[in-house]
Image (spheres, rainbow, N blue to C red):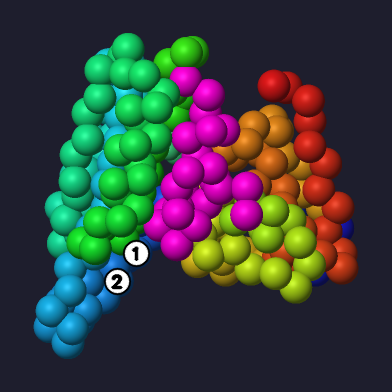
Amino acid sequence: MASSEEEQKKATIIDGKAIAHTIRSEIASEVQQLSTKHGKVPGLAVIIVGSRKDSQSYVNMKRKACAEVGIKSYDINLPEKVPEAELIQKVQELNAHPDIHGILVQLPLPAHINEENVLNEISIEKDVDGFHPSNIGKLGMKGRDPLFQPCTPKGCLELLSRSGISVKSKRAVVVGRSNIVGLPVALLLLKADDAVIRSSLTHTD
Ligand SMILES: Nc1nc2c(c(=O)[nH]1)N[C@@H](CN(C=O)c1ccc(C(=O)N[C@@H](CCC(=O)O)C(=O)O)cc1)CN2
């Protein structure tokens, strides 16, 4: 095998924990600067409906991560049977709250609540999950940039770039096409190199 080919076949180990540690220190110092210079502390409202164990665990991790970097998290825990209108009213209150800069509604929601109706209500300026149709739509459009990008897909691309792996001229296969991971990963890959990348979405969900 030619040496350049050998180079290309070499595996790269991605150290996710080390990268996460670096990113958290960067965010902590940005938050510190914001508060020193402008007297502002970023505020994130995290809404969870019901008591699914997996969702509780993800939400706890997000709240803990906020505390670690100095972001103030506002915990909103609503009962499983909360009416959709009440959840929407809560989102609207948070949209108008001056100390809350980001709103995150943990998914999935109980079956009686229409997820789309709720996500559409989040102000696009506070849509830190990037799930609002306007933000997702811009993610898919050439020359447009969403205000926020979904975090797990953004995390995948961030891991690659911080590990020195370029996606340019590569072929990518994305397994799954969920609104939360598969679809936005494919869109982010296209945005990263729309001239060359062909990303194929498999139909597992
Ligand atoms: N409002 C949101 N709701 C949900 C999201 C989200 O991003 N925003 N994503 C998932 C739940 N979730 C975070 O909330 C989440 C779940 C799983 C993973 C993940 O990376 N899983 C890895 C395993 C990681 C490990 O075990 O260490 C995997 O599946 O391979 C990230 C985020 C639904 N709801």
Pointers 2 and 1 in contact (C-beta within 8 Å): yes
160 is higher (above) or lower (below) than 184: below
In-front residue for pair 29/163: 29
- Name the mark on residue 89: none
Query: Which residue is at 83% across, 41% downward?
Result: 200
Label 2 sits on what residue type? Answer: Glu
Q: Is mark 2 within 8 Å of ligand 1?
A: no
Q: Residues within 10 Å of mark 2 (few under 14, many from 20)?
A: few
- Is residue 75 something that shows in the picture? yes
Label 1 sits on what residue type? Answer: Ile
Query: Which residue is at 29% across, 71% downward?
Result: 26
- Name the mark on residue 26: 2
Label 1 sits on residue: 23
The picture places residue 118, in percent across and down from the top left corner, at 47, 35
Q: Residue furthest bottom?
A: 37
Q: Which region is colored magenta?
A: 113-134
Quadrant of residue 168 in the image? bottom right
In-front residue for pair 68/162: 68
Quadrant of residue 6 in the image? bottom right
Query: Which residue is at 17% across, 74% downward?
Result: 40
Q: Is mark 1 within 8 Å of ligand 1?
A: no
Q: Residues within 10 Å of mark 1 (few under 14, many from 20)?
A: few
Q: Is residue 200 left or right of residue 12?
A: right
Q: Tell me if residue 118 is in the magenta stretch.
A: yes
Could you tell me which secondary element the residue under label 2 belongs to? helix
Query: Which residue is at 81% across, 48% downward?
Result: 199
In-front residue for pair 31/44: 44
Q: Is residue 162 left or right of residue 52?
A: right
Q: Is residue 153 left or right of residue 101?
A: right
33 is higher (above) or lower (below) than 26: below
Q: Is residue 50 left or right of residue 75?
A: right
The picture places residue 144, in percent across and down from the top left corner, at 70, 69
